[in-house]
Amino acid sequence: MKKNILVIIIFAVLSSKLFAQDLLDMVVDSTAKPQKEFVTATFKSTRNINFHTSEILPGRSLDFRISHRFGALSSGGYNAWGMDGPANLMLSLEYSYNGRWMAGVQRSFYEKMGNAFFKWKIIRQAKGGGSPVSVTYFGGAYNTFLKDPYLGYPIKFYEKTTDRFSFVNQLIIARKWNSRISSQIGVAYLHYNIVGAANGLSKNDAIVLTGVLRVKYTKRQAVIFEYGYRVDQTYGAAGTKYYDTFGFGWEIETGGHVFQIVAVNSFGIVENQFLTKTDTDWSSMGVRIGFNITRIFSVGGKKGDW
């Protein structure tokens, strides 16, 4: 009998402690700040066609990218409407450590352009009262490895190594409206250390307003659009005419790969080329067919989400 009473007392004490702990947990949960749920996959790639999107690679991820542009359709049937070239190719290697910032290096055939860039998602769009938009910063530094166009000494176009440099800074504001539609706007500031007839630029600085739209119509496919408005429409040097860049494409996502087939009037694939130096337009069939292929690898850990 005494043993039964002792068992009952021990059970009652333990039960009261567990009940008290449950009450304490309920109080803590009710006062805890709710966890933010961030919006993911605003875009399915760090690029739309040429433009950078607001997206950053998942943490511990490496992205190898190939971008190719054929010649202009206006080159005619003898040139297979651009298939015979001249073509442009860009190779890019990009890495993100934590999913909030990424860095990359690129090399483009056109103008033998090499560049490095840094990208940082400052604000992330969140659900349930969080930020309604994402804000991303992009910064790039560019160097042309072309031989000096003025070969006669002492006249040189690139007197100093720094004359070959140019820079782009861009602020991107993006929003995922629903499961199918995403868009972004941005403003880009470009600076060229040197300008002149050799590179077709009349001014060192330029501002371009950018817009991107992605419309998803199946689980893994979307149509994409982009447009860049040059605020200074007289940016070309004497005898050089430039146009706003515009393109659209078809995007297919296949797990680790993102494949884009695009049509765009820009031959250049890096920012200091297509934002200000697009020298063909849609009205005269100065359109180039191309594609982008990206492959993402997990490096040093489990790959995160976009």
Image (cartoon, rainbow, N blue to C red):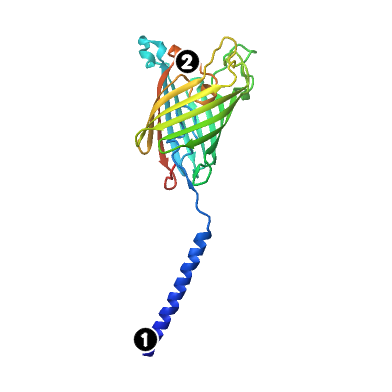
Find residue 297 and report its horizontal and vertical position in percent. Answer: 41, 40
At 48% from the left and 68% from the top, the residue drawn is: 23
Q: Compare marks 1 and 2 and give the one earlier in the sequence.
A: 1
Q: Which residue is mark 2?
A: 281
179 above or below 281?
below
Amino acid type assigned to the residue bearing label 2 in the image:
Asp
Q: Residue at x 48, y 29 (%)?
A: 212
In the depicted structure, whether residue 112 falls above or below residue 38: above
Work out which quarter of the rendered image holds the N terminus and state it. Answer: bottom left
How many residues crowd mark 2 within 10 Å: few (<14), some (14–19), many (20+)? some
Secondary structure under badge 1? helix
Q: Is residue 275 visible?
A: no
Q: Is residue 197 above or below residue 2?
A: above
Q: Which image quarter is the C terminus in?
A: top left
| Mark 1 to mark 2 CA distance (whole Å) | 93 Å
Q: Position of residue 91 (x, y in %)?
A: 45, 29
In depth, the one of 61 and 109 nearer the eye is 61
Camera-side residue of 7 and 114: 7
**Badges 1 and 2: C-beta atoms under 8 Å apart?**
no
| Residue 64 in sight in this render | yes
Task: Assign a secondary structure to mark 2.
Answer: loop
Q: Is residue 234 above or below residue 42?
A: above
- Residue type at tag 1: Asn
Location of mark 1 (residue): 4
**Direction from residue 287 to residue 135 in the image, left or right:** right
Q: Which residue is located at x 53 percent, y 35 percent?
A: 173
Callout in the foreground (1, 2): 1
Q: Position of residue 137 (x, y in %)?
A: 56, 35
| 52 left or right, relative to 204 | left
